[in-house]
């Protein structure tokens, strides 16, 4: 927890004026009231109608008063725990955490360097490696398990994570029924109601522009009932499912976020809600989604500022790449997205390990990003300008032309002041030429193999594990 606490102006870029925030908010309110948002769920529409929204067919036109009421009840701080009930993630201004993404159809096999369909073992290996990596704070299911029954593949993936890591996790669920089964399993594992000390968060994604599918609305209502933290994550495609302008795409994303928030808070005032999402461009040459285009990450900065304006925790993305394989482009894009979103002030930065614009899961990318995150944390921490760190007495003692290497001051502070990497290559050139000439990429492969061979995640109680397996069998 201490490593992630940052209280410096470097966190939160401050690019929006108060007037600009109010202008974006006002535009959003106008869209919600004039156009409304479509909800494919009768229960959601009944809730809106009962609280004064104008419901026409499947569209709820939401008055500003309901938005302001929801913003007044949603909590500004959320605490997430691990499987053992230890508080791990404090979602509040100045704290940021990193985790993987989920549900890619493909995986990059680190042993063969081939891209293939993802299988359940990819989720097992990714969870095991992430459990051992100090800079990965939460996990999601890397890869859609193509070898699991499609109807309940989300349950198989969740159980694979639960058995191979104690870290907090963000779940994706196909529907409300599967989510209820996962909650039943989780409560067995943690020994009590999930809402008391939540070790899980729910990922929920509307369908841009301005639609909430039936399962999305139902999962939001269930999360509100059970007090499970929910991340609401629009995925607007600029010039496709949103306007081509950055500002217009932000209005769509914010409208989807705030309409989801209103439903969630009307059902459960005070239930934990995490604001986030993306508004990324459609590549006008290929028609593909661009995870690492600058426009999407500019929008991420603006969404983070709006979240703070609303006093809500922030969900963003980084440590990912549009590159299909783990190459120079992947490490370049992964690095700048991690740094940008940490400086941005996002609380949860997910999608670490994604390649191919969210289509390919890569354990190599996860391990590379774990190293980069250490560097990012050091940059964001900045300089300590206390009297002791200004080092005046030491400077005077060493004097002109002396060496600081042998001083007690250096011995006392070098590990605190200097970031020391594990995998990055800093070897002296003649030494490297005379050795086995390891590279960053080869060091990563060695790290993965060593971790899978040596790291043993904390197991579940055998009796509880049998009960979980029975629940999965019945499902």
Image: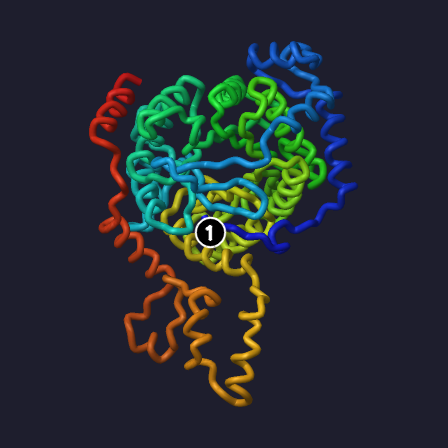
Quadrant in the rendering for residue 165: top left
Rendered location of residue 129, percent (x, y) = 32, 47
Label count reads 1
What residue is rendered at 37% in x and 35% in y?
A: 85
**279 left or right of 407 in image:** right
Which SS class for mark 1?
helix
Q: Nearer the viewer, residue 211 or 277?
A: 277
At 37% from the left and 59% from the top, the residue drawn is 441
Where 60 falls versus 344 (above or below)?
above
- Neighbourhood count class around disc 1 (C-alpha, 10 Å): few under 14, some 14–19, many 20 upward: few
Q: How is the image coloured?
A: rainbow
Q: Is residue 377 above or below residue 266?
A: below
Q: Position of residue 327 (x, y in %)?
A: 43, 56
Closer to the camera, 387 or 451? Answer: 387
Q: Is residue 395 left or right of residue 444?
A: right
Residue identifier under label 1: 2
**239 or 65, which lies in front?**
65
For this view, does 260 lie left or right of residue 432? right
The single residue placed furthest to the bottom in the displayed view is 401
Left or right position of 158 against 8: left
**Residue 33: x and y, percent?**
74, 21
**Residue 288 in sight here:** no
Query: Where is 252 relative to 443, above or below?
Result: above
Q: Quadrant location of residue 250?
A: top right
**417 and 304: which is toward the camera:** 417
Q: Quadrant of the C terminus?
A: top left
């Amino acid at each position: 927890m201490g490593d992630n606490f940052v209280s410096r102006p470097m966190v939160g870029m401050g690019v929006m004026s108060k007037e600009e925030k109010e202008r974006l908010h006002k535009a959003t309110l106008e869209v919600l009231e004039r156009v409304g948002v479509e909800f494919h769920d009768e229960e959601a529409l009944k809730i809106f109608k009962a609280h004064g929204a104008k419901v026409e067919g499947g569209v709820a036109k939401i008055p500003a008063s309901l938005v302001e009421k929801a913003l007044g009840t949603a909590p500004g701080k959320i605490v997430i725990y691990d499987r053992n009930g230890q508080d791990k993630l404090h979602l509040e201004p100045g704290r940021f955490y990193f985790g993987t993404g989920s549900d890619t159809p493909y995986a990059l096999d680190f042993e063969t360097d081939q891209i293939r369909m993802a299988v359940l073992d990819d989720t097992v290996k990714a969870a095991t490696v992430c459990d051992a990596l100090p800079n990965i704070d939460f996990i999601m299911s890397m890869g859609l398990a193509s070898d699991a029954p499609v109807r309940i593949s989300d349950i198989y993936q969740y159980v694979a994570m639960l058995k191979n890591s104690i870290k907090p996790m963000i779940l994706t669920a196909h529907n409300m029924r599967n989510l209820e089964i996962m909650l039943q399993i989780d409560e067995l594992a943690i020994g009590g109601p999930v809402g008391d000390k939540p070790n899980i968060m729910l990922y929920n994604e509307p369908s841009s522009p301005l639609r909430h599918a039936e399962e999305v609305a139902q999962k939001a209502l269930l999360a509100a009932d059970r007090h499970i933290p929910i991340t609401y994550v629009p995925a607007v495609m600029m010039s496709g499912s949103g306007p081509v302008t950055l500002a217009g795409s932000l209005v769509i994303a914010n409208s989807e976020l705030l309409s989801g928030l209103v439903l969630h808070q009307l059902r459960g005032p005070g239930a934990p809600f995490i604001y986030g999402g993306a508004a990324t461009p459609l590549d006008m040459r290929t028609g593909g989604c661009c995870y690492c285009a600058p426009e999407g990450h500019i929008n991420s900065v603006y969404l983070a500022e709006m979240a703070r304006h609303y006093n809500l925790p922030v969900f963003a993305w980084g440590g990912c790449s549009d590159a299909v394989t783990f190459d120079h482009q992947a490490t370049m894009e992964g690095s700048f997205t991690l740094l940008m979103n940490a400086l941005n002030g996002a609380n949860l930065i997910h999608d670490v390990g994604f390649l191919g614009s969210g289509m390919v899961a890569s354990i190599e990318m996860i391990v590379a990003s774990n190293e980069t995150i250490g560097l990012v944390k050091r940059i964001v921490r900045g300089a300590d300008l206390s009297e002791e760190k200004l080092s005046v007495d030491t400077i005077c003692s060493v004097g002109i032309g002396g060496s600081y290497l042998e001083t007690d001051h250096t011995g006392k502070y070098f590990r605190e002041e200097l970031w020391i990497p594990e995998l990055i290559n800093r070897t002296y050139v003649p030494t490297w030429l005379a050795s086995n000439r390891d590279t960053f990429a080869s060091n990563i492969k060695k790290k993965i193999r060593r971790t899978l061979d040596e790291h043993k995640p904390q197991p579940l109680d055998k009796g509880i594990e049998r009960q979980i397996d029975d629940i999965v069998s019945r499902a």
